[in-house]
Image (spheres, rainbow, N blue to C red):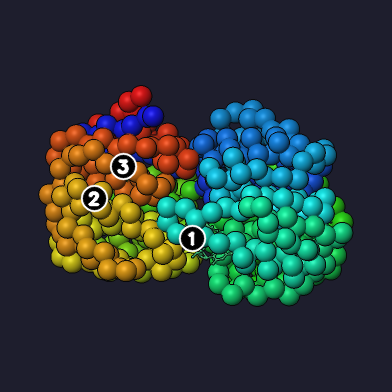
Amino acid sequence: MDKLKIKGGAPLQGQIQISGAKNSALPAMAATLLTAEEVTLENLPMVNDIITTRRLLRELGSEVEFPSNSSARLKTRNVISHEAPYELVKTMRASVLVLGPLLARSGRARVSMPGGCAIGARPIDLHIKGFEKLGASVATEYGYVEATAKRLKGANIVFEKITVTGTENLMMAATLAEGTTTLGNAALEPEVADLAQLLNKMGAKISGAGTSTITIEGVDTLHGAKHSIIPDRIEAGTFLAAGAMAGGDLELVSCDPGHLTSVISKFREAGVNIEEGKGRVRVRGGSPLRSADVVTHEYPGFATDMQAQYMALMTQANGISLITESIFENRFIHASELVRMGANIRIDGSRAVVAGKSRLTGATVIASDLRASASLVLAALVAKGVTTVDRIYHLDRGYEKLEEKLRSVGAHIDRVK
Ligand code: EPU
């Protein structure tokens, strides 16, 4: 199993290119199941979740080619299987995103129930209730969700709780339903709006994506299209934290500062020096950081996917900060690993109390999920001595060439087999 070895203390200087958003690319790939024609996706991040999705789509009958290392051509002339098996779903929960497209295109889908994961229970009850509202019969037995429908029928669905992939799954399913669907209390995440753009290029009639009410007028068929995935706002936020902690002068290019508003304003409150430009953000480290409380929230609030990285940042800020996790019930596993590196963090239910500034020292630490892994890498960049981050397969699922990008701006980071 690969590990990362990081020697802390080097300032970061230079430019980093931000990749396409993983959480936009995954639903976009699933959406291509909705048509028999070819869809080209550009600005894809070549991370392991994309490779897993390719495996899944191929099992379902798609031809998937990667003509370059950031684009894919996908074509599903015929759906040959309706099943997302346990082996794939257990490695990637986002596999549930094939439920909506399969059900809409061929009236049947069988997807292994994703269990809980390191960050929480993560049920999919709201996806299921939505499919039932669209007229599907849904059974959950033998560890699988099986949904069937002759043709889905438009409905008025109001989510009890905001769900990102739930909104995406229902939006995809409704594109081919008979009649009009409205999704209320929909997720506002930019990835939802990006998916709607792709679907509209494929011939769907969706309005309101990016607001809390999305309207989808069903059509009979969708066609091929070409679409470029939006930049990864969480990858950009992670590098912003790296620049703020390690010092130096770092510029992130090919990103969208408009998607980082809450992160940038929270970082500024904590004393981070950030300049925004068109498609770029510059962070200059070195100035003292101060504590600032944060509560994670759905978009446009402070993303739960930035909480672990923010905790690493707050270990380097003077004062006490309260970090409240309001989306997932168990997303603080990184805290105990940060403590092993010298951080002063106490967990009290959904709140973490971080007292800084701490002198961090290198240790062997274990990554528990994607963003937790990122927070350990950040801590390692400022720790005295060498940190070994184990189980980095979590990182490889969602960060493209993380160590190459960091090394190119001066970090002492190596992958060891
Ligand atoms: N929820 C339910 N029932 C449902 C669906 C969700 O109770 O049917 C709850 C969840 O348990 C959670 C909350 O609603 O407490 C929000 O979950 P959501 O459905 O929005 O999360 P998700 O769609 O499974 C996506 C991202 C996550 C990100 C969350 C929150 C993708 C592929 N994944 O997950 O990304 O943390 O939204 O923003 O888009 C990551 O990239 O590291 C990651 C975990």
Q: Identity of the amino acid at label 2?
A: Leu
Instruction: Look at discs 1 and 2 and give the one toward the viewer.
Output: 1
Rounded to the nearest angstrom, the CA distance separating label 3 from label 2 is: 10 Å
- The residue depicted at 59 percent of the width and 40 percent of the height is 87
Residue 267 position within the rendered picture, expressed as x and y whole percent measured from the top left: 30, 60
x and y, in percent, of residue 205 in the image: 77, 61
Q: Tag 2 or tag 1, which sits nearer the N-term? A: 1
Choose between 280 and 245: the one closer to the eye. 245
Give the label on residue 338, or none: 2
Residue 325 in view, yes or no: yes
Q: Which residue is mark 1?
A: 121
- Residue 366's tag is 3
Upstream in sequence: badge 3 or badge 2: 2
Kind of element beneath mark 1: loop
The x, y position of residue 124, in whole percent, is 60, 61
Q: Nearer the viewer, mark 3 or mark 2?
A: 3
Residue drawn at x 33%, y 32% as measured from the top left: 3
Amino acid on which disc 3 is placed: Ile
Distance (Cα) linking label 3 and label 1? 21 Å
